């Protein structure tokens, strides 16, 4: 299996399940405050391309391998990123995503907020993310169409977070997953607020996102209208 992780598109849950497939249970008792475990190679035992270039090449080209990734509706992906990484966080150094913002804020828009008594509103985050979506400064809001554009790799499956249970079945089938493993396979975690999307999005915000991520909407078949 070769999996390309797209942040904010069920990547934590997919990593947890892949780790479980090789006998390292990061699924049972999963808690969001221990999310670091599934992103730590020593904790999960999942291999990266740097762990074996020849092995990676074989996985990228073998007809017996399954190469897959997952994507997400750009509207809900940006909302999830803001809620998880920026909401109510002071805009000072000390947190990774905030430091990315601070490093590029002035170039993106010097009018955007900064300081210990400031935090990013969703509208401010949308403005920043849409301006920098093609700058390749952070995959959490980079265009997904750019992330999956991996030279030499043709994906057999581009699943969607919205149909995770159905799409991830192909991965489970590929490894001959047991009934127990299938029962343990989790649906993706949604970190954004449970409030209705319409509570966050104005028509202007939605239009800004659509224009910045139009390639994602088109390539992955997402409608321009906000999800229900």
Image (cartoon, rainbow, N blue to C red):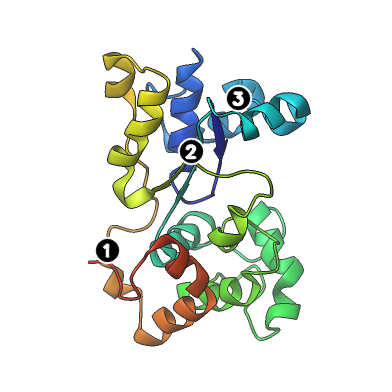
Q: Residue furthest front?
A: 63
First reached walking from the N terminus: tag 3 or tag 1? 3
Q: Quadrant of the C terminus?
A: bottom left
Q: What residue is pinned by disc 2?
A: 12
Disc 1 crowd rating (10 Å Cα; few below 14, some 14-19, many 20+) is: few
The quarter of the displayed image where residue 186 is located: top left
Q: Are marks 1 and 2 in contact (CB under 8 Å)?
A: no
Q: What residue is pinned by disc 3?
A: 46
Q: Residue furthest left?
A: 228
Q: Nearer the viewer, residue 119 or 198?
A: 198
Single out the mark in the foreground, 3 or 2.
3
**What residue appears at the point 45 percent right and 35 percent down from the top-left corner?**
14
Q: CA distance from mark 1 to mark 2?
A: 22 Å
The quarter of the displayed image where residue 181 is located: top left
Single out the mark in the foreground, 3 or 1.
3
Single out the mark in the foreground, 1 or 2.
2
**What residue appears at the point 49 percent right and 42 percent down from the top-left corner?**
11
Q: Nearer the viewer, residue 145 or 154?
A: 154
Q: Nearer the viewer, residue 165 or 174?
A: 174
Disc 2 crowd rating (10 Å Cα; few below 14, some 14-19, many 20+) is: many
**Residue 163: where, in percent of width, then height?**
30, 47
Q: Which mark is residue 22?
A: none
**What residue appears at the point 55 percent right and 69 percent down from the top-left corner?**
119
Q: CA distance from mark 3 to mark 2?
A: 12 Å
The answer to whether 136 appears left or right of 88 in the picture is right
Secondary structure state at the residue bearing disc 3:
loop
The answer to whether 145 appears left or right of 168 in the picture is right
**Residue 132: where, in percent of width, then height?**
65, 72
Q: What residue is pinned by disc 1?
A: 195
Q: Is residue 25 visible?
A: no
The answer to whether 122 appears left or right of 95 in the picture is left
Q: CA distance from mark 3 to mark 1?
A: 35 Å
């Amino acid at each position: 299996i070769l999996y390309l992780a797209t942040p904010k598109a069920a990547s934590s849950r997919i990593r947890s399940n892949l780790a479980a497939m090789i006998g390292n249970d990061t699924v049972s008792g999963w808690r969001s405050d221990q999310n670091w475990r599934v992103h730590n190679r020593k904790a999960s035992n999942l291999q990266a391309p740097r762990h074996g270039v020849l092995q990676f090449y074989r996985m990228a080209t073998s007809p017996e391998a399954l190469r897959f990734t997952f994507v997400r509706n750009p509207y809900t992906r940006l909302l999830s990123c803001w809620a998880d990484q920026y909401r109510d966080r002071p805009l000072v150094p000390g947190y990774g995503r905030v430091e990315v913002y601070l490093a590029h804020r002035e170039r993106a828009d010097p009018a955007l907020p900064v300081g210990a008594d400031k935090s990013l509103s969703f509208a401010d985050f949308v403005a920043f993310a849409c301006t920098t979506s093609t700058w390749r400064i952070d995959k959490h809001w980079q265009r997904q169409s750019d992330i999956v554009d991996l030279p030499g790799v043709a994906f057999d499956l581009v699943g969607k977070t919205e149909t995770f249970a159905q799409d991830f079945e192909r991965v489970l089938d590929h490894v001959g997953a047991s009934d127990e493993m299938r029962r343990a396979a989790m649906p993706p975690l949604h970190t954004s607020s449970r409030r209705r999307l319409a509570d966050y999005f104005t028509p202007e915000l939605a239009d800004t996102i659509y224009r910045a991520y139009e390639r994602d909407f088109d390539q992955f078949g997402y409608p321009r209208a906000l999800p229900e």
